[in-house]
Amino acid sequence: MLMMWLQLGMHLCEGQCVGSIFYSTCSIPIVNMTTDGGARLRKAFEVAKEVTIGKMIVSISPSGPFLQRFANYVDLVWFDSYREAAFQVPDGNTISGIIIGYAPGMRTFIAGSNTHLESLDISKCSLDRVPQTLPKMTKLKFLSITQCKITVLRLDMFADNQYLKNLDLSYNQIQQLLPVTGRPARMLSIETLTLRGNLLQNLDLALFVAMPQLLNLNFLNNLIVSLDVSAPIALPNLSGLYLGYNKLVSLDLRNLTLPKLETFSFGPNALTQMPILPRPLPKFNYLSLSANNLTQLDMTYFRPYPNLQKIYISSNQITTVRASSPVRLQVDYLELSNNKITTFNITGWDMPNITLLNLDGNQLSVVPSVFERYPKVYLFMNRNPVLCDALLPFKDRLKNYQLQKDPWPLSKACTTISSFTVDETMKICCDQ
Ligand SMILES: *[C@@H]1O[C@H](CO)[C@@H](O)[C@H](O)[C@H]1NC(C)=O
Ligand SMILES: *[C@@H]1O[C@H](CO)[C@@H](O)[C@H](O)[C@H]1NC(C)=O
Ligand SMILES: *[C@@H]1O[C@H](CO)[C@@H](O)[C@H](O)[C@H]1NC(C)=O
Ligand SMILES: *[C@@H]1O[C@H](CO)[C@@H](O)[C@H](O)[C@H]1NC(C)=O
Ligand SMILES: *[C@@H]1O[C@H](CO)[C@@H](O)[C@H](O)[C@H]1NC(C)=O
Ligand SMILES: *[C@@H]1O[C@H](CO)[C@@H](O)[C@H](O)[C@H]1NC(C)=O
């Protein structure tokens, strides 16, 4: 007989209400399945939709036959902690959701034929591959195996899971993605693929041609140094591509056709040049290039993207912002804080919708002449060496915080050689 410590939270789906209670929970500190445990559990489910067990004693395993025995009562099984090396879902089991929160010893997961399981979520386990029996769980919609030991991801594995929409394999040790093979290649139905925190170094987005339903692709926190698109492909539904916290020095996405793309998130990385993006991108709205190594910003770069409204390029090495030829942009939020900007030349670029321009933490000694053209814009210029003479004309805007430049309490001494008073409580410290 095995002794095991585990906590199960069992939810009965669509159960009857008891009296006037809509949702009832009961908890049993200890259940001995080798004696009266089964009867106690059945009784508990007569009065509660959710039963929590502190410790359960079973004769063989808390998966396999155990799951079968309770399938009639239980819709979702949640193991806080699972101590066995194998997890088994019996043939024909009808439970629709299984969550295993902590299973450091679990090395295998075996499923029988199954047409009910829709959601499987395993974390902190020792699985080193995606379960081979995955194709048997034909109705699976959501699969998450995180903080385990998977090293290779074969997209072929998912060809029989035509309902699978959401696949999360974050924080494994995946170094390699293998494309769908077979001719003609079968298409996968995955909409959201999350591979955060793996060990990918090289990535070819062309292999996602087998996932035409993709909405979001997330590769944050890998070791990607090179990302290619080795053949022209379209991802007709892709809305977000997340590549931050990698080691990309350059990025060329010209071979992608992305009619629905809204968000590109590319920072932090080590980009020294602006990425080469597909054009057109009719829905492109949000770009983040924060924490890269860009040195110049020519606003004409954004010309092909008439719907781009949010641009975040903070924490780079940019010294000059200008437009090499006239351009009109829809941007409403332009974030350029913590660069090394000494020249911010707004001649030739128009941004009638701008509401916030953040230039905090740069090297500007004058206030760019933005208020004349955009009287309602909020301009942030904290931590810039702007001289008193350059700030004085903006006293009213400093007072209503439309211009923010290191507001200082009137009562506190400045560290600069000069200052001027803005109102009863605030002054600006600056050099002459
Ligand atoms: C569980 O029940 C079996 C059978 O009666 C008994 O031998 C065992 O000691 C019980 N375990 C615990 C921890 O109570
Ligand atoms: C685009 O695809 C072609 C193959 O058609 C390939 O030769 C080329 O290198 C790719 N370009 C980029 C920038 O990835
Ligand atoms: C993908 O796009 C097609 C065509 O625009 C649409 O019919 C389908 O519903 C989309 N899929 C998702 C998951 O949005
Ligand atoms: C950016 O460039 C500087 C100087 O070339 C280098 O020291 C730094 O490591 C680079 N940063 C990144 C994130 O690559
Ligand atoms: C600002 O940019 C315009 C257009 O590129 C250029 O003609 C002008 O000389 C620049 N002004 C300064 C002060 O650099
Ligand atoms: C930008 O402002 C113009 C008016 O100046 C307005 O017609 C347009 O709808 C605005 N665009 C966005 C995306 O808000």
Image (tube, rainbow, N blue to C red):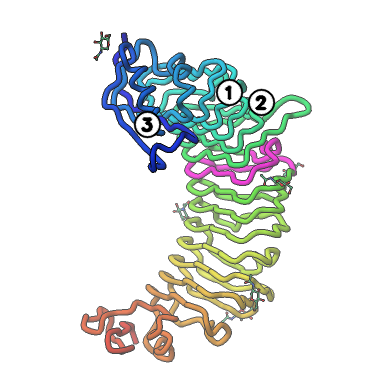
Label 3, on which residue? Answer: 47
Viewer-nearest residue: 277 or 63:
63
**199 left or right of 10?**
right
For the C terminus, the quadrant is bottom left
Residue drawn 44% across and 75% down? 380
Whether residues under marks 2 and 1 lie with C-beta atoms below 8 angstroms apart, the answer is yes
Whether residues under marks 1 and 3 lie with C-beta atoms below 8 angstroms apart, the answer is no
Whether residues under marks 2 and 3 lie with C-beta atoms below 8 angstroms apart, the answer is no
Label 2, on which residue? Answer: 160
- In which quarter of the view is residue 24 placed? top left
Magenta-colored span = 204-232
Label 1, on which residue? Answer: 134
**Local crowd at mark 2 within 10 Å, few (<14), some, or many (≥20)?**
some
Residue 217 visible = yes
Where is residue 183 drawn, in percent x and y?
A: 77, 26
Callout 3 amino acid: Val
Estimate the spatial distance between the alpha carbons at disc 1 and disc 3, rounded to whole Å.
35 Å
Viewer-nearest residue: 426 or 296:
426
Residue 172 visible = no
- In which quarter of the view is residue 425 placed? bottom left
Viewer-nearest residue: 340 or 140:
140
